[in-house]
Amino acid sequence: MLTMDDVLGQVGEFGWFQKQAFLTLCLLSAAFAPIYVGIVFLAFTPDHRCLSPGVAELSRRCGWSLAEELNYTVPGPGAAGEAFPRHCRSYEVDWNQSGLSCVDPLASLATNRSHLPLGPCRHGWVYDTPGSSIVTEFNLVCDNSWKVDLFQSCVNLGFFLGSLGVGYIADRFGRKFCLLATTLVGAVLGVLTAVAPDYPSLLLFRLLHGLVSKGSWTSGYVLITEFVGVGYRRMVAILYQTAFTVGLVLLSGLAYVIPHWRRLQLATSLPTFLLLLYYWCVPESPRWLLSQKRNTQVIKIIDHIAQKNGKSPLPDLKTLSLAEDVTEKLSPSFADLFSTPHLRKHTLILMYLWFTSSVLYQGLIMHVGATGGNLHLDFLYSALVEFPAAFIILTTIDRFGLIRPLVVSNLVAGAACAVMIFISHASASWGISGSEHSDTHLFMGLDSPFPQVQICECVCRVRCAIYAARSGYRHVSKTAGPTHTPTDDA
C-alpha cells in the first residue's frame, strides 16, 4: 500500500507546487511578528514628567528652553532607591503665582529645593515624543506602569489558551479551515485593537487576538510540512521560522515610518485580510484528507501537485488508503507523550528547554529594542542577528545532528546573558542569536524523540498534539516571564 511519503517521492518532494505554497504560507509567519513583539513599539515609554498647570505659561513668559524649564521646574533623580521622582513626582507649588522669578523661580520659596514638598502627578503627564503609544494615551506610567506588563501577558495567555485548542480544531476540521478561520478572526481583532476606546477593551481584544493568532501560525507550519517530502521538512521548518525574522525587520521599518500606535496597529492588521486568498491558493493537506477517508479529494490534490511539478499523474493512487483494523487500535493523544519512561523523559526535557528558550528570547529582544539611543535601530539589529542563526542551523544540522548544536547554542546564549551585565548590547545580540538557534533546534527536534507511525491519522494527530503542547507550554513561560519596555518606570 502506498503512503503519502511514497507519493510525494514520485510527484516531487519540493517541486514548484511546494515552493509556491511555502512562499505563500511564509507570509503568515512574517505577519505573526507584530503580534508577538509589537509591544516594543505599541507600548514604548518615552521620557515624561508631571504636567504642572502654569509651568507652560511661565516658560513662555521667561523664554526658557526645554532644558531650562526641566532644570527649574522638575525634581531631580532623587536618592538611590527612590521611584523616579523626576517622572512621577512634582513640586507642590502654585506656578501661577506672580512672585516667581525667571531665574531659579523656586529660590524664593526655599533655600534648598530638597525641602520643597513633592506630590503625585495630579494633572497627568507631559511626554517628550512626536508619536504616541498606549502608554502615552492611557497614562500607563508610574503607579500604572504594571499595566504595560499586563497588556503583554494578555496576549501570551491568549497564545497559551489558543494552543490548547488549535490541535483539536486542525485535526477535527482540517488544517486549511483552522488557518482561514483563525486568520479572519485575527485580522478583525487586530483592527478592533487599533480602535479600542479604553484600556479594558484593549486588554480584551489583545487576549482574543493572541487566542487565535498562534493557531494561524501553527496551522501554516503544519500545512507546509505536510506538503513536502521527508528530506525537505527540516529546511522548510527553519526557513518558516526565518520568515518570522523577516517580519521583525519589516516591523522596525514600519514603526519608524508610523510612530503612532493606532495607525501602526492598523498597518499591520489590515494586510492580513489578504491572507484569506489562501482559500483559492492553498489546498487542504492530503494527509489530513486521507485520515478522513476523503480519497477522491486526495487524488485530485495529488494530480494537481504532479501537474504543477511537471510530473505525470500516478495511475495507482486508489491503493492510497487506510488500514481499518490498524487505525481502530490507534488513538494517539496528548497523554501518549508521557506514556513510557523514554517519552516522559524526552517530553520533560523539551518542556524545560522550551520554557527557558522562550523566556530568554522574549526578554532579550525586548531589552535590546528598548535600552539604546535609537529604539528602531536597536530593534532592527536585534532582528538581524537571527539570520546568521538560521544560516548556521541550515549548514550544520545534517552534519552534526540536533543535540550538539542545541547544546552549543544554549551555552552561547547563557554566556552572553552573563556577559550582558558588563557589555549590554553586544552580548544581548549574541544571546538572541543563541536563543533563536536553540529555539529553532527545539522546533526541528519535536518529532525526533517520538515514534513515527506510517498511518496518516496517527501521524496527523500526534503532530498536532506535539506542536500544540510545545506552543502552549512556551507561552506559559512568556506569560510568567518579564516584559521590558523602553524606559520603564520603577
Image (cartoon, rainbow, N blue to C red):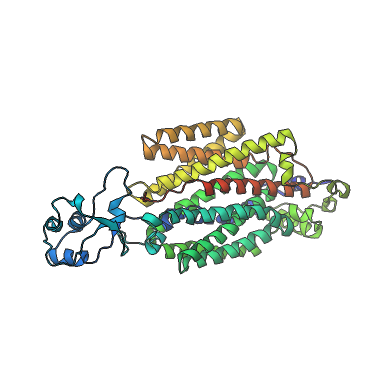
Residue 441 in sight from this viewpoint = no
Q: Residue at x 53, y 44 (%)?
A: 358
Image point (18%, 52%), residue name: 113
Q: x, y percentage for residue 386?
A: 48, 43
**Residue 360 visible here:** yes
In depth, the one of 449 and 302 nearer the eye is 449
| Along the viewing direction, whichever of 225 and 428 lies nearer the viewer | 428
Q: Residue 182's x, y, as percent?
A: 62, 61
Vertical arrangement, residue 263 with respect to residue 299, above or below: below
Q: Is residue 150 left or right of residue 25?
A: left
* Residue 275 image offset from top left, x and y in percent: 58, 62
Q: Kindly give the residue lying farthest to the right in the view shown.
A: 325
Residue in front for this viewpoint, 379 or 420: 420
- Is residue 487 depicted above or below 426 in this figure? below
**Location of residue 276 by image quarter:** bottom right
State whether residue 165 is above or below residue 3: below
On screen, residue 412 versus residue 16, left or right, reads left
How many marks the image carries: the answer is: 0
Res 346 → quadrant: top right
Asked if residue 137 lies left or right of residue 35, the reply is: left
Image location (x, y in percent) of residue 242: 53, 47
